[in-house]
Amino acid sequence: MEYIVKTENLVFEYKIQVQTEGEEATTETEAALNGVDIAVKKGEFVAVLGHNGSGKSTLAKHINCLLSPTAGTMWVKGISVADEERIWDIRSSVGMVFQNPDNQIIATIVEEDVAFGAENLGVPPAEIRKRVDEALASVGMAQYAENPPHFLSGGQKQRVAIAGILAMRPDIIVLDEPTAMLDPIGRREVMNVVKKLNREEGITIIFITHFMDEAAQAERIIVMEEGKIAMEGTPGEVFAQIAPLKAIGLDVPQVAEIAAGLREAGINLPQGLLTVDALVEEICRLR
Amino acid sequence: MSIKISNLSHTYSKGTTFEKKALDDINITIERGEFIGLIGHTGSGKSTLIQHLNVLLRPDTGSIIIDGEDIHADKGRLKAIRSKVGLVFQYPEHQLFEMTVFKDVAFGPANMGIAEDETRQRVEDALAIVGIPPELHEKSPFELSGGQKRRVAIAGVLAMKPEILVLDEPTAGLDPRGRDEILGRIKEMHEKLKLTVILVSHSMEDIARLVDRIFVINHGKIALFGPPAEIFAQTQQLETIGLSSTQAAYVAKHLQEKGFKLPDGIYTVDGAVTEILKVVRG
């Protein structure tokens, strides 16, 4: 099996200064990642859940070498992140989208912003033109190519940010809470674009989120807690474990909770019901 | 403390090419002690509306009467009105600036000219109700977690002893635990301090759990209003304006369409479980 992202016992420690009044400052070491083993297949759509401080973002930043591991190993497309000479090979294959749409757009015209990354990679101008047009079409923003970005909605800005990454032709896109600051329409727009890129263009997606209904749309969910993998499985498997999820401060989609409530009361329903339609269908069978 | 908003309209950049009518003839009455949810997508006019409530913006036409007083009538009353209506902005933790948590929360009351003893008491009370323990009071606010920072920022507004608390998206960007913590505290403030609360949110689930009444705003107008059970039953209308109902409401609605005799107005997990059990067991 070919894994596009693989880690073995990944550890990341950082130092913090502790200052108590009247005493010398001391340095303490904290582990943000504490032995993480993940393996993501090419073309997979993986959601990462976990509360703030569980290590999700630290893990994400290792995938395109914004951080390097303290211990353990990580390979992206078979290249070890410790191989400094090939760091740019990794970075040009892994695109990242962050939470705040306003922090990711730098140009004054949408298409110039989308071209920025590809220009930096030294792509020839004619090729850039082609890539920018394709990328904007892919995210449904072609009609805004010549607009200034500050009049766009949050969801539209995130789609422009994604287009900028597409123009760099990445194999993997890592999205770190891309919908946290968006309204319901914006969230839906971004989610639809991400699913389409995964399905139609085969791009591997690693999607960090606090929204359980978004995680439910992934192929696989990884739950992190205290720098470790706490749970892993299909959305059906993970969201069946309501009590353990709640114990670590996470949630399950409402549908899964309703199904669990009915099951507890003795109603015979299968595991893994995550969508309104699936639950309604099963309840109809009870008649 | 009732709030009466009559014929309120506001247009941005009037007379320029960027002219935009943000509020268009809004009429709302809110009773003392009510817990109100205000929903609408980005650009619907929610933030413009709440900025009128403590006179950060002035209406083009119409008025807001709080406790019988037209809040936009007398500029000399600004300070009094702003301490009566506490406004917690989006991402309020970006406004933290002091050296310690305690000093940050004390800034508002000290600025209002409240005596030191009274300020100290208010800061302690405010931090207690948002759940920030005494051992964090002398820490830098920047050492706290995201959810804690946000609660400190809310305490800063509470220390001014407002009678009306307006919160703009208080759970945006928080993880589920941080979200539950903040919402639980807001509920407590509403109950213990008898505050009138106006909660602006995109999250239907949050709104569904807490509020007495909902106003849905769209294109600067009030599109729907009523208790949660009525609003969440209108799935079609909510979708037309770019919102959605709760998953529980959708489950109930689809089951009704399939011929199940479920009552109207189901929108919570517990409500759905109870009612579905009744019909499937016959």
Image (cartoon, helix red, strand yellow):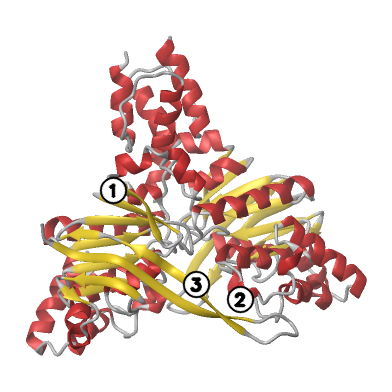
Q: Which element carries disc 1, helix, strand or loop?
A: loop
**In this figure, which residue is indicated by the disc labeled 1?**
A217
Q: Is residue A123 left or right of residue B234?
A: left
Mark before the other along the chain sequence, 3 or 1 = 3
User: Looking at the image, which residue is at 9% across and 78% down?
Assistant: A130
Coordinates of residue A49 in the picture (x, y in percent)? 39, 55
**In this figure, which residue is indicated by the disc labeled 3?**
A30
User: Looking at the image, which residue is at 55% across and 38% down?
Assistant: B228
Coordinates of residue A9 in the picture (x, y in percent)? 31, 65
Circles 3 and 1: CB distance less than 8 Å?
no
Q: Is residue A128 left or right of residue A53?
A: left
Q: Which element carries disc 3, helix, strand or loop?
A: strand
Question: What amino acid is found at the position of numbered circle 2 in the picture?
Answer: Phe
Choose mark 1 or mark 2, whichever is in front.
2
**Host chain of mark 1:** A
Q: Is residue A214 visible?
A: yes
**Host chain of mark 3:** A
How would you rate the neighbour count of disc 2 (Cα within 10 Å): few for under 14, some for 14-19, many for 20 or more?
A: some
**Host chain of mark 2:** B
**Mark number, residue B142:** 2
Marks 3 and 1, Cα distance to the nearest angstrom?
33 Å
Choose mark 3 or mark 2, whichever is in front.
3
